[in-house]
Amino acid sequence: MKYNPKFCDAVAADPGLNAVHPGAPASLCQGWLEIMVTLEEKLCAITGMSAATLQPAAGAAGELTGLLLMRAFHEANGEDRRRVLIPDSAHGTNPASVTLGGYEVTTVPSNDRGLVDLEALKSALGPDVAGIMLTNPNTVGLFEEEITEIAQAVHDVGGLLYYDGANLNAILGAVRPGDMGFDIVHMNLHKTFATPHGGGGPGAGPVAVASHLVEFLPGPQAHRVEDGTFDWVAPPRSIGRVHGWQGNALVLARALAYIDVHGSDGLTRVARHAVLNANWLRHRLRDILPAAYDRVCMHECTLTATKLKQAYGVRGLDVAKALLEEGFHSPTVYFPLIVEEALMFEPTETESVQTLEALAQAVERIAQRAADDPVSLHRAPQSTPVSRVDEARAARQLIATADAAR
Amino acid sequence: MADYLPHTDDDVASMLSFLGMASLDDLFAHIPDAVRLSGGLEVEPGMSEPDVAALFARYTGANAAKATAMTCFAGGGAYDHEVPAVVKMLANRSEFVTAYTPYQPEVAQGVLQAVFEYQTLVARLSGLPVPNASLYDAATALVEALNMAHGATGRQTMVISSGVHPHWRQVARTFARGTGHRIVEVPLRDGVTDWQSVDVTDVAAVVAAYPNYLGIVEDLSGAKALAVEHEALFVVGGDPVAAGVLKTAGQWGADVFVGEGQAFGTPLSFGGPYLGLFACSEAQVRRLPGRIVGETVDSSGRRAFVTTLRAREQDIRREKATSNVCTNQTLMAVTAAIQLGWLGTQGLREVATRCAQGAHYLYDELMGVDGVSAVSSQPFFREFAVRLSRRADEVISSMAESDVLAGLSVATLAGGDDPSIEDGIENVLLVAVTERRTKEEIDRYVELLKEALKR
């Protein structure tokens, strides 16, 4: 969770942005079109791509848009490709998007370093492969060091590389997806450019593409006209609209303000400090929660609670719940699926080392409790407004409204 | 140069020392040189907040259409409603705005209960028992409804009234490229869907709009009969403010309701973030897309809320999931719950009635204006289409000079050959009236339109 700058909220609260009707003629909302064109240009510079659509309302919508672009590209070449490759460490949204994009999933195993197994990947490739979806750094928080070889292999069979931008924060100013060989990139603006999570949305999931895919982008697109004005245009072979209007515009405006404040220097610092924080925390916690793959990580570290489980029967979930009692929001638990008792910490660049030290000390207290009174951890948290909730009951007997409850 | 990083130079030095590293570059040393960015990002250097604010002041100054400066008679699924101060103040509380997704229910009861209240209100507005926690917007909610219909029937043909908002239909066509759904659009005659013209098989869904995008309140019994005949799901989409005075989707026999929730407390926002309303019958609950909040108890037996039926969701079912939605529009859903809670049943009825009264007053006045004629003889709610003696986009530009946004050009909204208008679509203007429009503003609109048509 990044700090959400109040400044960006203030920008989006201006009636000059939030009181504009989305169907007004372009001549009456030139400021909005300029914001969209400018954001598109900056997102392309950050990712190393040629053009972008801002319509997708969240990362998952961006993924599906990207897969439809992949499909449009192959169809335009007269090719009927069937499969999309996904590493076994991928988030579940990836395979769900593949299915909705009309493709079949082929899962590629990870190797013992937590990275894509290049040989397994090569054996899964063939002329029926439409592309691969990759997160880099991957969901374990590790950089796919063989990305050039992966890109070469996929391109050699005529497939495209899709970049899941969930972890873009780690590489701002250091590496660009376009330079790694990716053809399609989605971004989660709430993860990288600090737009507020809102308790689960709104997000925004722009998709940027390499030059050979620009003609298929959703339309209408905001466009800079030669006379310095702005207008809407539909790309020549557009897949069509993916949003009722222009996307989550106020989220887009916040992201542009964030990018403008940081600039090239600030964005680069964001990634470097996010990676510093994650590595410091990984190293600080190594005796209690060792890393699943013990080497330099990127912006997040995937640790494992197997030592506590073996010694005291205390699981990752217990540690996560006990952290709530300590005043810390739990890390992601049991993801990615390839790591046993996973606890994935993503401190971001906006937590101070003092906060990270306090977190580490909380983990130490929990480890001591695990040794002294492990049963108390199974009951944690007790100091929160409610204790552990009965999830099975909620699913067994659905009560989704106050009327159903009566 | 500005940023929001808390580290001092000493912090960075001591953290690197703890890691046994000499510089921040060491953290990136394992990235192959071949892909490393040399020379930095081609983005301008960082600016101070006041400098960025000045830049944005230039953008906002170039947005002449802002409703604070231009009286808004544009609708088409985005309406200039009053947002009471209480809604803005409560919805902007940081406990809602900056909260993480409620994966840890013990520390997220506030968000979860607010969404539960939202779900209750969506169920009542739709007349259907099982709502979800929101989707991106109405257009993408319709896509989810079509996917649900495919899952329920195993069939591929989606019969959609062209009274459904043109953008929603366009989005449905886009996503059908992946799912392979066949989209059949049914034309309007005199503003009403010609269901008799439908001659297809393999029907998964029949989709009607209520009111339709031209504001017309159609009798949905023909659409329902068609859905029953084909054993297809009956999907009703539309303007949820109408539920203040008209029948609900459930009362029409719908299996699924989709709607645009922007009218409930979210400003026009240039089209987003908006709020996709979604509710369905009990029979479809296992195919419900997105998140849903359920009531349960905690380990001490206290009432508690949690996201539930997780086994449907993409992160568990992966490639077998029927929806890929995870992030939704929680903050807009919470906003809608606050707005509807503030209005109550009576308040929503008053808003709907005042919108309808204003729209009918304006329509009646316009019917007496030379160069304005009816597009349809059918009853309408708070929005209507009229045919002008000039192109609608020209009239909009002309009236904008007097700071009135006259409405939307249907040709621009729908495309030049949309089956919703029988002929001469370029001259059709879509006009909406909300409770914010005064009689003086409406009277002035009539005078300005008369002038615009004379030019």
Image (cartoon, grey):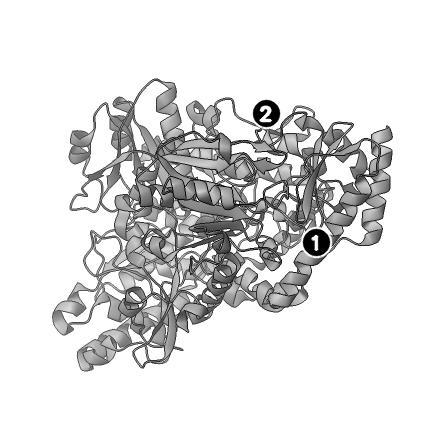
Q: Nearer the viewer, residue B244 or B196?
A: B196
Q: Amino acid at mark 2?
A: Asp
Circle 2 packing at 10 Å, graded few (<14), some (14-19), many (20+), is few
Residue B332 appearing in the image: yes
Q: Position of residue A390 (x, y in %)?
A: 29, 72
Chain letter of the residue carrying label 1: B
Q: Is residue B196 left or right of residue A375?
A: right
The N terminus of chain A: image quadrant: bottom left
Q: Are marks 2 and 1 in contact (CB under 8 Å)?
A: no
Displayed quadrant of residue B340: bottom right
Looking at the image, residue B390 lies above or below residue B448: above
| Furthest residue toward left | A310
Looking at the image, residue A2 lies above or below residue A354: above
Looking at the image, residue B25 lies above or below residue A81: below
Q: Position of residue A403 (x, y in %)?
A: 45, 69
Upstream in sequence: badge 2 or badge 1: 1
Describe the element under mark 1 as helix, strand or loop.
Answer: helix
| Furthest residue toward top | A78
- Residue of label 2: B417
Chain letter of the residue carrying label 2: B
Residue at 58%, 33% (x, y): give it: B188
- Residue of label 1: B355
The C terminus of chain A: image quadrant: bottom left
